[in-house]
Amino acid sequence: MPNVLAVDGNSLAHRAFHALRHDDPDGHFVTRGVVRMLASAWIEGPFDALVVAFDSRENRRKDLFPEYKANRPDKDPELRRQLELLGEDLRGCGLTVLQVDGAEADDLLATIADGCTARGWACAVLSSDRDLLALVSPTTRLLRPRQSMSDLGVYDPAAVVAEYDVRPEQYTDFAALRGDPSDGLTGAKGIGPKIAARLLRDYGDIPGIYANLHNLQPKVEAALRTYRADVERNLLLMAPLPNLEVDLDAIARGGVDLDGCDRALLPLGMGAEVGRLRHAVERPPLPPMPPPPGVAPDEVVRIPDERLPRRPLAAVVPVVEGEQVALF
């Protein structure tokens, strides 16, 4: 069964840009940082294939809602240049790089995760974006760097429930209720994370909540009625774009071309980074961790298998910016 590492190229590029721009301002320093991060993430493998997704410059979500991410400053011209170099360098390595007009990296990652699930493949999504918790499933994990790559949060369904008190398939509804200030999206004012989680636990999803407004406390009911348009807009904008074409079989066949990385990156002075990636990829997998004391080896934590269908976005697409500072 293939194990695919699906990478949010914009997320990792932002982290590398803010961490390393002063170290090598004229070179391919974002590529250098991203290769280091890929090597660090490999400990969660081993992986049979690697695919990196990027945002498109066009953004259909902004066409639908001009305020979407309008609160973010214009992208630094040097960051734009580094993103272009990163894409070229990764393609030169023989890696699969995806970018679809109008779509964000998140949309492509959702397509990859769903495709892997349909085939029974394992998938790990590498991104700092919390919204991708919605992709987590019994076959898909989110690898979410926090302060650094050595502080890598690994989310399976149980971890999502433990941290947010909602199932992964409810996370988009959770975020829609709460809002996302980083994207310029307000939620239902007065509905914080705890109330949102309780409502979803009691009524399943946002349509279920609105069908039961008469059962809610007056303040909660009033907030949901007042901000219903905002919540429904958030659901539309946060849902992944449907019908994106990704050739997963080609991605699986491509594997990871370490010799191609040598050819593309060694002339750029990235011998240490390529060596680190080669060591990570060729290293034998770690043995499984023993179960905690008193837990039988075959005991598995199971999450109720009541998956709600992920709502596709009607007709929308993007360009992102999350300014994330990271240290290696």
Image (spheres, rainbow, N blue to C red):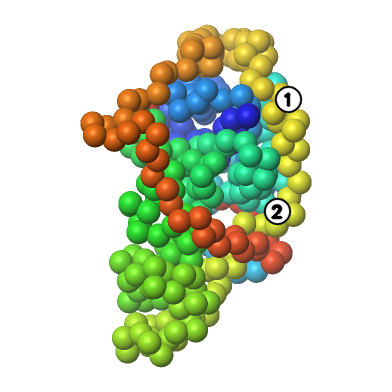
Q: Quadrant of the C terminus?
A: top left
Q: Report the residue at 35% width, 59% height from top.
A: 165
The answer to whether 325 appears left or right of 120 in the picture is left
Residue that sits furthest to the left in the current view: 293
Residue under circle 2? 102
Q: Quadrant of the N terminus?
A: top right
Tell me: residue 90, above or below residue 189.
above
Q: Work out whether mark 1 precedes mark 2 in sequence or the reverse, and give the earlier one.
A: 2
Q: Distance between the residues labelled 1 and 2?
A: 27 Å
> Residue 306: where, in percent of width, then height?
51, 60
Q: Report the residue at 33% width, 52% height from top.
A: 163
Q: Which of 136 and 57 is in front in this view?
A: 136
SS state under label 1? helix
What is the number of the mark on residue 253? 1
Residue 1 appears in the figure: yes
**What's under tag 1, amino acid-wise?**
Arg
Q: Nearer the viewer, residue 20 or 286?
A: 286
> Residue 323: where, in percent of width, then height?
44, 46
The answer to whether 114 appears left or right of 190 in the picture is right
Residue 59 appears in the figure: no
**What's under tag 2, amino acid-wise?**
Gly
